[in-house]
Image (tube, rainbow, N blue to C red):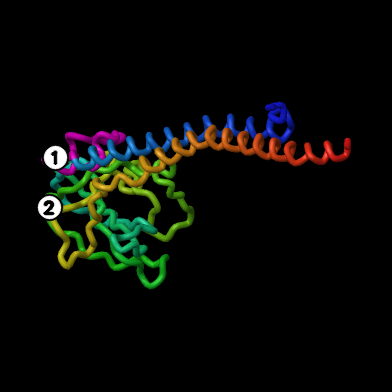
């Protein structure tokens, strides 16, 4: 009765189903792990944003790679802006998804070291190769509060480094690269400024990272696992349908053979 399962068509179909089951199970776990990662990241963001600001020198130092546990930690730094070495970061968007620049200004601390401060977003100049008009940074000593971020690399950000960029324009915020330009020691990572607010909201401060949305990864995981359960069910349905079709064909053929015999 089930000899048809040994046919080439059914062997291929069965092997395909057997391969499909573990693949879809793995895809479900992949989405589940993405869900777990998103939940953990949201918890980290929320906890670090609520934490009391600490001196930036407590969390980073020259050449230090900011660990994930310290991403978005509230830090503060007191010093004087070095506007002579101010640069802009290309191809950055604001909260309305408009493309422009981020303004990166070194803040020289009391001990002579510097920390990079991302003061916020400004629009492009008339053409993208011209250096834009940048709202002036406060003069004299200032205390900056913001979120600690890790140095950007192509691997971590997906942003490609470009050659022959216009003067004082960069693609990545990286303390080691800026230390070479400044000729002074720079703390690892950078500060994403949140206070004090700039006059006229220019540069526009960078919005807080999202810590509430978890996406649809868990729903996708459940879908993949439901699809996995559906594969053997579908295989059984096809086998039963094949049996019914063969039985119906055999039934229709019996009277013809009996008539021919008579």
Q: Is residue 228 left or right of residue 209?
A: right
Q: Which of marks 2 and 1 is in front?
A: 1
Q: What stretch is highlighted in magenta?
A: 47-72
Where residue 159 sits in the image (x, y, percent)? 43, 49
Where residue 219 sits in the image (x, y, percent)? 37, 43
Q: In this view, does 231 lie to the left or right of 241?
A: left
Q: Which residue is drawn at 43% across and 44% down?
A: 154
Whether the magenta-drawn stretch holds residue 198 is answered as no
Q: Is residue 15 left or right of residue 133?
A: right
Q: Residue at x 45, y 49 (%)?
A: 161
Secondary structure beneath dot 2 equals strand
User: Between marks 2 and 1, how big is the CA–CA gap?
Assistant: 22 Å
Secondary structure beneath dot 1 equals loop
Q: Earlier in the sequence, mark 2 or mark 1?
A: 1
Where is 198 relative to 9, above or below? below
Compare residues 235 and 62 and report the one nearer the observer: 235
Which residue is disc 2 drawn over?
142
Mark 2 neighbour density, 10 Å: few (under 14) some (14–19) many (20 or more)? some
Q: Residue at x 30, y 44 (%)?
A: 214
Where residue 88 sits in the image (x, y, percent)? 33, 58
Residue 51's disc is 1
Where is 167 relative to 28, above or below? below
């Amino acid at each position: 009765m089930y000899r048809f399962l040994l046919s080439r068509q059914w062997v291929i179909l069965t092997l395909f189903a057997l391969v499909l089951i573990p693949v879809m199970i793995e895809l479900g776990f992949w989405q589940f792990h993405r869900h777990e990662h998103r939940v953990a990241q949201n918890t980290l963001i929320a906890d670090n944003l609520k934490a009391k600001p600490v001196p930036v020198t407590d969390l980073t130092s020259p050449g230090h790679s900011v660990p994930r546990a310290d991403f978005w930690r509230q830090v503060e730094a007191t010093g004087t802006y070095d506007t002579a070495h101010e640069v802009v970061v290309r191809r950055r968007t604001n909260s309305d998804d408009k493309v422009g620049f981020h303004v990166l200004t070194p803040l020289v601390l009391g001990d002579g070291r510097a920390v990079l401060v991302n003061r916020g977003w400004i629009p492009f100049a008339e053409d993208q190769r011209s250096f834009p008009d940048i709202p002036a940074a406060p003069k004299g000593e200032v205390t900056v509060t913001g979120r600690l971020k890790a140095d950007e690399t192509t691997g971590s950000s997906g942003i490609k480094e470009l050659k022959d960029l216009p003067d004082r324009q960069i693609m990545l915020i990286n303390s080691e690269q800026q230390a070479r330009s400044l000729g002074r020691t720079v703390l690892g990572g950078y500060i994403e400024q949140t206070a004090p607010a700039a006059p006229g909201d220019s540069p526009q401060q960078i919005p807080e990272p999202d810590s509430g949305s978890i996406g649809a990864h868990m729903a996708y995981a459940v879908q993949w696992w439901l699809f996995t359960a559906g594969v053997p069910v579908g295989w059984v349905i096809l086998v039963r349908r094949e049996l019914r079709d063969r039985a119906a064909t055999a039934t229709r053929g019996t009277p013809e053979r009996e008539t021919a015999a008579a």
